[in-house]
Amino acid sequence: MNLQGKVAVITGGATGIGREIAIRFARNGASVAVDYVAKSDKADEAVREITESGGSAVALQADVSKAAEVDNLIAETVKKFGRLDILVNNAGIETEMPFWEVPVDLWERIIGVNLSGPFFCAKAAAREPRFDEGARSHLGGAAQDLAVFGADDGIPALESGERTDGVQGAYQGQQPFPRTACALEPAGLEPREQRG
């Protein structure tokens, strides 16, 4: 995949899947904005790995559940790189507890990041005049589960089909220039304590 000259925002890009996406995109020629909330050291490490390999990247702090911070993320990306071509809605929260034990404040945080976040990001990107300037773009989401896992009790994860469908459907045919919206749902991951 040739991404030479493209600019990408990767939400939740400091760790895990987001970090790997950022590194791969940079390796393929894209300039990358690595979004993070609290782990500035991890974001800096990802940026350093990219730049030491000859790529171009910047770490930008934004909580995707807050529309104003998302607007700033997009604006700062365009200010740094001059344009925006690709948005990857990767940020997401998961918990490893039975859903009936999830406190209301955590549930509201999950909804804010996993559902409102992709909406705020795609909305901000779609309104950016220099977003792809008429070429094919990707308003993508690594659509994660609502991520309430049943731990060892066999309760299945609660998944948000609405998020996946929304990413795919909300932007098709809504702009006077062609865009591609895609949603990718990675395979389920083991709870952190079970991962190698």
Image (tube, rainbow, N blue to C red):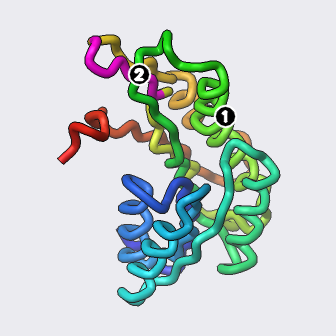
Sort mark 2 into few (<14), some (14-19) or many (20+) by Cα contacts within 10 Å.
Answer: some
Residue 152 versus residue 164 in the image, above or below: above
Q: Which mark is residue 171?
A: none
Dot placed on the residue nearer the N-terminal end, 2 or 1: 2
Regarding residue 113, the answer to whether it shows in the image is: yes
- Residue type marked 1: Gly
Q: Could you tell me how far apart the alpha carbons at marks 2 and 1 are, in whole angstroms?
A: 19 Å
What residue is shown with label 1? 112
- Where, by quadrant of the figure, is residue 156 drawn? top left
Q: Which mark is residue 97?
A: 2
Percent across and percent down for residue 150 are 35, 17
- Residue drawn at point x = 65 percent, y = 41 percent: 117
- Residue type marked 2: Met
Regarding residue 137, the answer to whether it shows in the image is: no
Percent across and percent down for residue 180 are 55, 48
Secondary structure that dominates the magenta span: loop
Q: Quadrant of the N terminus?
A: bottom left
Residue 136 appears left or right of 143:
right
**Magenta part of the protein: which range?**
147-153
